[in-house]
Structures are given as structure tokens and as C-alpha cells.
């Protein structure tokens, strides 16, 4: 039987058998209740579909991550780490649910868990990649044209990185240790997801998600709308945000 282990800051709080399904969110009708403003009322659900276990984001405000990557729907693999706010759910496909540790910092009520992380930084990285793709109309014939647009980039000012410049082409770009991060941080003790940069209208918004990132030498807290010349400092790596002219292909029926 598969299970999910709810963790906070490395402490295991409770195990949940997936069974017919587990819902996660801030409202009291969820199986797992996380009392934090960064978590949506109905944030995500995990359920069995045939021989697979599916994680589905329920159009949450701040998104759902698996192993540092934003997802909307994902087939869970053994030891996958699901990040919701600051809490993790570790997936175990071959174990039965067990009782929580006696000293776990939780308050139980039936089969629910209430958690209050008062020092949690608000996660505001809007995740729209799969949603936008699903909403695009399908056309059989199209005329393709190219129009200029501005693209945000991160330029390495100091520190070691794989590239000198990173283009923020995705709807959500990650800075962290995760293998799926755009800007990879090296070292075991670096956060898997340190900063999420999301497209927001015609601009970009940066949100701290782990570690102690800075923006213009001040702590990055909450949402920060990036401006030309802003400096992000993440685990010793200094990145400058800038605009760069790009080309986007557009199609019309």
C-alpha cells in the first residue's frame, strides 16, 4: 500500500495511506489541513488511478512542486518529494501508513493535521505552464509570424554558475539545487528551491522559497516585482535582472 509522509523542516508529522484519495489544503474539509495563508483552501489531491498514484494541483495560488519542479498533474514515483508551501509530502509506494512520532509538533483531530508555520514566507510564484497549454485552441492550419518582445534574463555578476546568462523563458523559473532548476546551485546544503521567478503580466515576480536570498542586499520576503538592475544574491551567487529583446513566434488561424 502506498503512503504519504507529511514533514516540516525535516520532522515527520504523520503518515497517510493514499487509498481512495487524500486532499490537502487550508479548509477543514481536507484530509490534511495546513493552516497557513500560503496554502490554498483546496490546494492539491493525491489519488490512485489504476496502478498509478496521481498528484493533481487544484489550481492553487502558489502551486505544487515535485522534486523542485512545478507541476499541475504528475504520476508519483517512489521517494518523490511534494512541496506545498513549506511542507513536504514524501511518497512511499510500498509501505503502509503508520502512527506519527510521539513528539511531532502537531495537533490532531480525527484523521486531520493542523499546522501553523507563523514564520513562513508567503509563496507567490504563479504556475500556469500546463494550464496555459491546455487552454490553447488547436488549429489545423496557421500562418506564423514573428513579433519582438522583451525577455527577462539573469546575468551572473559574481559566484560560480554553469552559464553567464539565463533567459527567463518559462512561466516559472527556479534557482536552487534541484536538477530541474534553471540556475543550479552546487552543494549538498544549498536549498533545492531557493527562489521562484514567475511571469506576471508583462513582468516577473521573485519569491523566496528556501535559504536566505537577498534582493538589492535586503532580505527577499514575500513577492518582489523585478526591475531592471535588481540584484539577487542566492547562496553566494549574485545575479542581475535585466531585459533583453527577443523574438516570439505567434500563429493565427
Image (cartoon, rainbow, N blue to C red):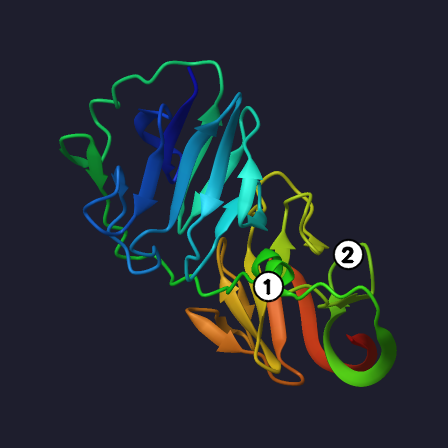
**Where's residue 202, x and y in %?**
62, 83
Q: Earlier in the sequence, mark 2 or mark 1?
A: 1
Tell which residue pokes out farthest to the left in this image: 109
> What's the residue at 53%, 63% (across, down)?
213
- Alpha-carbon span between mark 2 and mark 1: 35 Å
Judge left or right: residue 71 versus residue 239: left
Q: Is residue 184 left or right of residue 101?
A: right
Q: Residue at x 70, y 56 (%)?
A: 182
Q: Which residue is mark 1?
A: 135
Relative vertical location of residue 194 with respect to residue 243 in this rendering, above or below: above
Residue 153: image x %, image y %? 74, 73
Image quadrant where one finds the C terminus = bottom right
Q: Could you say which disc has been placed on residue 217 in the image? A: none
* Extreme-front residue of the structure: 140
Query: In which quadrant is the N terminus drawn?
Result: top left
Q: Residues within 10 Å of mark 2 (few under 14, many from 20)?
A: some
Instruction: Identify which residue, 137 or 93, lies in the foreground.
Output: 137
Circle 2 residue: 161
Q: Give the residue displayed 61% in from the left and 58% down from the top.
A: 134
Question: Is 245 situated above or below 153?
Answer: below
Front residue (pair 217, 43): 43
Name the secondary structure under disc 1.
helix
Are the residues flagged by discs 2 and 1 in contact, CB closer than 8 Å?
no
Camera-near label (2 vs 1) is 1
Which one is in front, 147 or 11? 147
Residue 216 point in image, percent of width and height: 56, 78
| Residue at left offset 49%, top offset 19% | 93
Residue 133, percent across and down?
64, 60
Amino acid at each position: 500500500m502506498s503512503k504519504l509522509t507529511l514533514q516540516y523542516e525535516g520532522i515527520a508529522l504523520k503518515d497517510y495511506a493514499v487509498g481512495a484519495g487524500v486532499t490537502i489544503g487550508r479548509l477543514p474539509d481536507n484530509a490534511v489541513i495546513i493552516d497557513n495563508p500560503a496554502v490554498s483552501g483546496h490546494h492539491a489531491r493525491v489519488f490512485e488511478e489504476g496502478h498509478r498514484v496521481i498528484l493533481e494541483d487544484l489550481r492553487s495560488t502558489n502551486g505544487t512542486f515535485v522534486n523542485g519542479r512545478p507541476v499541475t498533474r504528475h504520476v508519483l514515483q517512489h521517494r518523490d518529494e511534494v512541496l506545498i508551501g513549506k511542507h513536504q509530502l514524501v511518497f512511499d509506494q510500498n509501505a503502509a501508513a503508520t502512527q506519527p512520532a510521539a513528539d511531532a509538533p502537531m495537533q490532531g483531530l480525527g484523521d486531520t493535521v493542523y499546522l501553523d508555520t507563523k514564520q513562513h514566507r508567503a509563496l507567490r510564484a504563479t504556475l500556469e505552464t500546463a494550464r496555459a497549454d491546455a487552454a490553447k485552441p488547436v488549429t489545423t492550419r496557421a500562418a506564423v509570424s514573428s513579433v519582438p518582445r522583451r525577455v527577462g534574463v539573469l546575468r551572473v555578476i559574481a559566484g560560480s554558475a554553469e552559464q553567464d546568462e539565463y533567459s527567463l523563458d518559462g512561466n516559472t523559473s527556479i534557482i536552487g539545487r534541484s536538477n530541474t532548476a534553471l540556475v543550479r546551485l552546487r552543494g549538498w546544503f544549498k536549498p533545492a528551491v531557493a527562489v521562484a521567478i514567475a511571469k506576471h503580466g508583462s513582468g516577473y515576480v521573485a519569491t523566496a522559497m528556501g535559504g536566505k536570498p537577498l534582493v538589492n542586499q535586503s532580505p527577499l520576503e514575500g513577492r518582489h516585482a523585478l526591475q531592471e538592475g535588481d540584484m539577487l544574491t542566492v547562496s553566494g551567487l549574485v545575479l542581475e535582472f535585466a531585459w533583453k529583446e527577443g523574438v516570439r513566434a505567434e500563429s493565427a488561424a
